Amino acid sequence: MEYLQKAGSWLKELTAMALSVLALAVVLQVLFGSGVAFFPVDVVGNVVELTKSLGSEGLVGLVALWVLISLFNRNQ
């Protein structure tokens, strides 16, 4: 059981770090445009595309978004 707690803690920290990197990438892309050298991916474009795809699904997209947010908030 101790191993599962350690693994869960490790995954929480990894998720928090990934969200921090994502936020940094969004801020840098807003400030410097899409040509940020060390983030070769269009982060803002991907976030916008994800939002559009969830929004176009109507109720199913909203339920999926609610499930993802509740799973993320449950572990905090």
Image: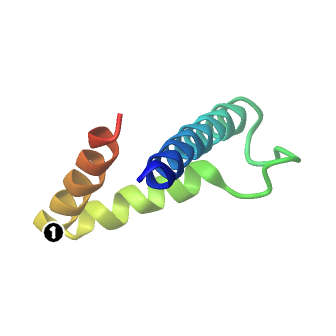
* Picture quarter with the C terminus: top left
Count the marks: how many? 1
Give the quarter of the image for residue 32. Answer: top right
8 or 12, nearer to the observer: 8
Tag 1, which secondary structure?
helix
Percent x, y of residue 61 = 22, 64
- Which residue reaches farthest front? 1
What residue is rendered at 70% in x and 39% in y? 29
63 or 49, nearer to the observer: 63
What residue is rendered at 22% in x and 56% in y? 67
- The residue under label 1 is 60
What residue is rendered at 52% in x and 52% in y? 7
- Which residue reaches farthest left? 59
| Mark 1 Cα shell of 10 Å, populated few (<14), some (14-19), many (≥20) | few
**70 with respect to 17 (left or right):** left
66 or 25, nearer to the observer: 66
Percent x, y of residue 72 = 34, 45
Look at the picture and state if 69 lies above or below 55: above
